[in-house]
Image (cartoon, grey):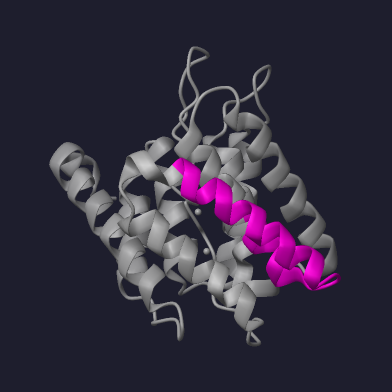
Amino acid sequence: MNTFRRIGTSSLLFFCVFSSLARAADTPMPESVAGIAHRWASISYHSPEKNREQELTTLAVDAEKQTKAYPGKVEPLVWQAIVLASAAKAQGGLGALSKAKQARDLLLEAEKMNPSALNGAIYTSLGSLYAKVPGWPIGFGNADKARSYLETALKLNPTGMDANYFYADFLVSQKEYAKAMEHLTLALAAPARIGREDADAGRRKEVESLITDLRANHRDNLQN
């Protein structure tokens, strides 16, 4: 369960998702919605970067169809938000901000329906958005809100790979390197998600990459 690097006003390069962000559901998702999740993982981790914007844009249309096909169900709504956020990342630029806002609004709607759905994916995704989207006056980014959402996600899913990874990524942005490493270690030890092996494999590589970066660039700050 797809997030943005904070950048200046001249360009918006949106997050590596979130590029996800989704957790396995407490109850099985409809097969067609699970298909969206698998297609998202395939595009996010295996498609050439130059093709991702178009492929994710197409997937976003299909994800919206699933939301309409299952009114009142939270899982399609969350996955539509995840795909939109990933499409924003692939697109980049000011035009991507509208997709980020749409993803946020869908997640806030999902929160009203079932805040604990998908093992905290709503809060992981909201936290990632608020962490990576530029702040006012350009966007809605807010570090305090990001921390609050990400910590809520961890309360719901303390051993989850995504919850720990995205919180660690946020902590790096706040220069809390030792704490970030603690959560990256937890992310590596996360239990496998049945039916989400493809996403787990891709996320694990991102966790390992961030660990490598911390050890290479912030080794002296990794001790409490």
Q: Residue at x 64, y 60 (%)?
A: 62
State the image coordinates of residue 185 (x, y, percent, origin top left): 30, 65
Q: Is residue 15 visible?
A: no
State the image coordinates of residue 23 (x, y, percent, origin top left): 54, 71
Reply above or below: 109 against 54: below
Q: Residue at x 21, y 39 (%)?
A: 218
Q: Viewed as shown, does residue 32 lie left or right of 45? A: right
Q: Residue furthest left?
A: 216
Reply above or below: 223 against 165: above
Reply above or below: 116 against 56: below
Q: Residue at x 16, y 43 (%)?
A: 219
Magenta-span inclusion, residue 48: no
State the image coordinates of residue 2 (x, y, percent, origin top left): 50, 54
Front residue of 212/93: it is 93
How many numbered tags mark residues here?
0
Front residue of 78/166: it is 78
Q: Residue at x 47, y 29 (%)?
A: 6
Q: Viewed as shown, does residue 181 lie left or right of 52? A: left
Front residue of 212/36: it is 36
Reply above or below: 62 against 119: above
Picture quarter containing residue 129? Answer: top right
Q: Is residue 170 visible?
A: yes
Majority secondary structure of magenta residues:
helix
State the image coordinates of residue 105 (x, y, percent, origin top left): 76, 46
Front residue of 67/148: it is 67
Q: Viewed as shown, does residue 63 lie left or right of 14? A: right
Q: What span is in magenta?
A: 53-81
Magenta-span inclusion, residue 70: yes
